Amino acid sequence: MRAGRIVLLIAGVLIALMGLSTIAAGTGALWAHTLQQDTDGYLTSPSFQLEDSGHALTAEHLELLDSPGVWSWRDRFDLRLQVTPEDPTEQVFVGIAPMTDVQDYLDDVAHQEITQLTTTDVDYRTQPGARTPEPPAGQTFWAASTDGNGTQTLSWTAEPGTWGVVIMNADTTTGVDVAATAGARTDALLPVGLVLLAIGLVLLGGGAAMAITAVNRPHEQAVVPRHLPAPAGHPFGSYPVAVTGHLDPQVSRWQWLVKWLLLIPHIIVLVFLWLTFLVLTIVAGVAILFTGRYPRGIFDFNVGVLRWSWRVAFYGYGVLGTDRYPPFTLAETDHPAHLDVTYPEQLSRGLVLIKWWLLALPHYLIVAVLTGGAATWTYQVSADQSWQIGLGGGLIGLLALIVGVALLFTSRYPTGLFDLLVGLNRWVYRVIAYAALMTDDYPPFRLDSGGDEPQPSPPAPPAPADAGTRSPQPAPH
């Protein structure tokens, strides 16, 4: 791929990722507008238990910036605070006012300022003082306030400025103990969500178009590697995803200890390639939904990403099957690891909606065992010090580690483990190709081990019509 195409591809992927993020933000705004509102149209927080041994609880420095014009705060953003005292006979006061007025009112008054709210904890900053404030209901600086027995609901239409919220006993006695929930309502969620969704779609479409232009090239006849025979049916074997590998006659007994360092350049490149793979798969899914065909340029690029990844895994800690460094290319090479996928001339439009998440779910569970998971051992050195040893990588990583230890001490690769590791990786890449919409053939629940793809068995000869009445003939010598 030429440098200009690479730049265009990277720019397209970045723009498409920005589009996906914007679409996610817009979808979230629309979801909040339609699903998370109560009967009054408010988005409501969980209930928080707030306590203070002083005279008041405050939340200060609530800054609302001015936004003139159609997006003005006024009449577009409403706040609601519901406060329930622990003692139902206690009269509670709730008010909101400019922050400077709140600070003047509570100057030299012992109170707690709420600095952070989480679903499990509330953080306070203690403000000491010796003065008892005047009854809050008699003050004139409140923008909105309410007081009385039981649950009190404060509603306020937001205005630009810096504000403070005060919760206290109406008679200014010490000891505030309440449960509080906050809510917000705005007319802007719907238009903001639609605008973000539209912008995201434009960015995604533009980025995808740039990426497709970068990877699209005149179709070239695929070259079937010599180690992949072409039987009837799929040109690469019994399943349309062919994953093969040839074990080096002599694998270094120590090089696997430093391959993690040697593979860093490949890992950096693969991060960007897989981001591109994800974006282009989404674009291909839309194309399949409307045309039933996987765009050939995207297909060839995605196959190249899988091919590159398999070469890295075969050299690295997926198999440790060769010491030959993987080439930096999407194309087929003479490297010992090979991967190819039969191009589907036609794909199901309906399956594209469900196969990548629903139909592939059983395989995802298996792949998680093969490639994921971790084990941790803890050694307690002392009461305040311990060592932890972690091992990750799933079954494939564990078997590769066993291979590495065997190489280190015997300089021989256990061939049985090689066949098993290639088979397990073959299962993983079949699932990836299916989930990436590259084939409609469901991955078999079968471990096809060995370096070469299994070939379909020849059909059995038809039985003679009178096989039930004639005596069996002796087999020819």
Image (cartoon, rainbow, N blue to C red):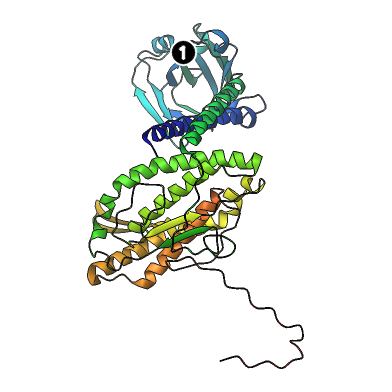
Residue 193, percent across and down? 58, 25
**Residue at image x 53%, y 21%?**
92
Image quadrant holding the C terminus, namely bottom right
Judge by depth and name the residue closer to the eye, 365 or 177: 365
Judge by depth and name the residue closer to the eye, 294 or 13: 294
Judge by depth and name the residue closer to the eye, 116 or 150: 116
**Residue at image x 41%, y 42%?**
273
Drawn side of residue 211 relative to residue 398, left or right: right
Drawn side of residue 244 relative to residue 401, left or right: right
Residue 114, percent across and down? 41, 25
Numbered label tally: 1
Instruction: Please identify the quarter of the rendering in which residue 185 is found.
Output: top right
Confirm whether residue 317 shows in the render. no
Residue 93, percent across and down? 53, 18
**Residue at image x 29%, y 64%?**
404
Q: In this figure, which residue is indicated by the disc labeled 1?
A: 65
